[in-house]
Image (spheres, rainbow, N blue to C red):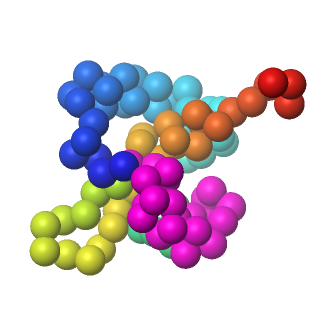
Amino acid sequence: MNANQLSEAQINEIYERFPLNCKLLNYTPKGRPLTNIEASDFAGCKPNTFEQKRMNGTGPAYIQPEGSRRVLYPEPLLLDWLASGLRLNTCA
């Protein structure tokens, strides 16, 4: 999901959850968007996995500056995506 597809209200909610998500995921904020390599490393997967998820729309929201091939992941959006997979048990 491109960060442009999120509403202002959704973004505000994500930023409000950021401190809690940092605690849940034992993350120290860098204060800047993460590169594909940094984001995939923190998530524990390979960079091409994030590229595939970005292509099929199942990955975290990202920013891609106009006219650039570079992709960046804002920390609050990345951590919110990771925390959305939090499960307390394996029962359906």
On whether residue 45 falls in the magenta region, the answer is yes
Q: Could one spot residue 44 in this view of the protein? A: yes
For residue 38, say whether it is visible.
no
Q: Is residue 51 left or right of residue 5?
A: right
Magenta span: 40-61
Residue 10 at x, y percent in the picture: 32, 27
Q: Residue at x 49, y 53 (%)?
A: 59
State which quadrant residue 22 falls in.
top right
Q: Is residue 24 left or right of residue 56?
A: right
Q: Does residue 35 appear left or right of residue 79 in this picture?
A: left
Name the spot of residue 90 as percent of width and height, x first.
86, 30
Residue at 13%, 67% in the rendered image: 66
Of residue 63 and residue 53, the one placed in the foreground of this image is 53
Picture layout, residue 51 above or below residue 4: below
In the rendering, at what x and y percent does residue 1 appear? Answer: 36, 49
**Residue 14 magenta-highlighted:** no
Give me the residue at 29% from left, 74% from top: 70
- The C terminus, quarter of image: top right
